[in-house]
Image (cartoon, grey):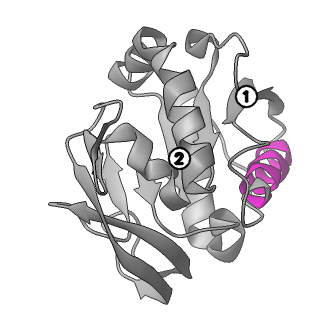
Amino acid sequence: MKITIGYLYYDLLNLYGDSGNIKALIYHLKEQDIDVDVKYLTIKDKKDFSKLDMIYIGSGTEDNLILALNDLKEDFDSLKEFIDNKKFLLATGNSLELFGNYIVTNKKIKCLGLFDYVVMYQDRIVKDVNIKSNIIDKNIIGFENHLGKVISQNDDIIKIDNYIGTYIIGPLLVRNPYLCSYYIKELIKSKDENFEFKN
């Protein structure tokens, strides 16, 4: 089996060591004897999302986030098809803001609208996180540092089909091995429901 991961804006949206999530995915997939191909994609690169099994995107400055947003709009149809096919998308830090309807600052910034939520900027939130979720039966831990607040969704973690968006920054999957194990298994099963996992 081969799993292809698109690491979007690895050079722009990697503010807090987010690349640790890619390293964790590669390591644990290879533990299962799965061939892993990571496509490192950034501004102006040709993006064929139909060839990907998963997308990962990390956190960055507000300016870099807008650069990524404008670039993704160029590939909107391909990305929407990826989402409609319930492929896997993991967005950590403020990159989750890209996939909702709007970011509201002193103006209203139209986002991709792939999921139904709005982000409102407010005073900066800096906090440790230790939360329950509807994903695994263990608490998820981490750290947040962001301006946005998601309206009408759980602030700390959003799960819609195979999309997970969270304001938790950095190597989320490294710090949360149960979440990493869950994610790896779901990703593999999407390719082969009868896959025999190693312990």
Q: Residues within 10 Å of mark 2 (few under 14, many from 20)?
A: many
Q: Quadrant of the C terminus?
A: bottom right
Q: Quadrant of residue 134?
A: bottom left
- In this rendering, position of residue 157 left or right of residue 12: left
Q: Which amino acid, by three-letter code, is at mark 1?
A: Thr
Assign the N terminus to one quadrant of the image.
Answer: top right
Q: Is residue 36 visible?
A: yes
Name the residue type under label 2: Leu
Mark-to-mark CA distance, 2 and 1: 16 Å
Which residue is at the front of the view, 126 or 138?
A: 126
Precedes in sequence: disc 2 or disc 1: 1
Magenta region includes residue 23:
yes
Instruction: Name the dominant secondary structure of the magenta segment.
Output: helix
Q: In the shown orientation, is residue 13 left or right of residue 87?
A: right
Where residue 132 appears, as percent x and y from the top left, is: 35, 80
Residues in magenta, as a range: 20-31
Judge whether 118 appears above or below 181 on screen.
above
Q: Secondary structure at mark 1?
A: loop
Query: Foreground residue, 20 or 66?
Result: 66
Q: Which residue is mark 1?
A: 42
For the residues bearing labels 2 and 1, Cβ distance under 8 angstroms: no
* SS under mark 2: strand
Q: Nearer the viewer, mark 2 or mark 1?
A: 1
The numbered dot on residue 90 is 2
**In this picture, residue 179 sits left or right of residue 25:** left
| Residue 193 shows up from this direction | no
The answer to which of 18 and 67 lies nearer the viewer is 67
Quick check: is 121 in the magenta stretch? no
**Residue found farthest to the front:** 106
Percent position (x, y) of residue 20? Answer: 78, 60
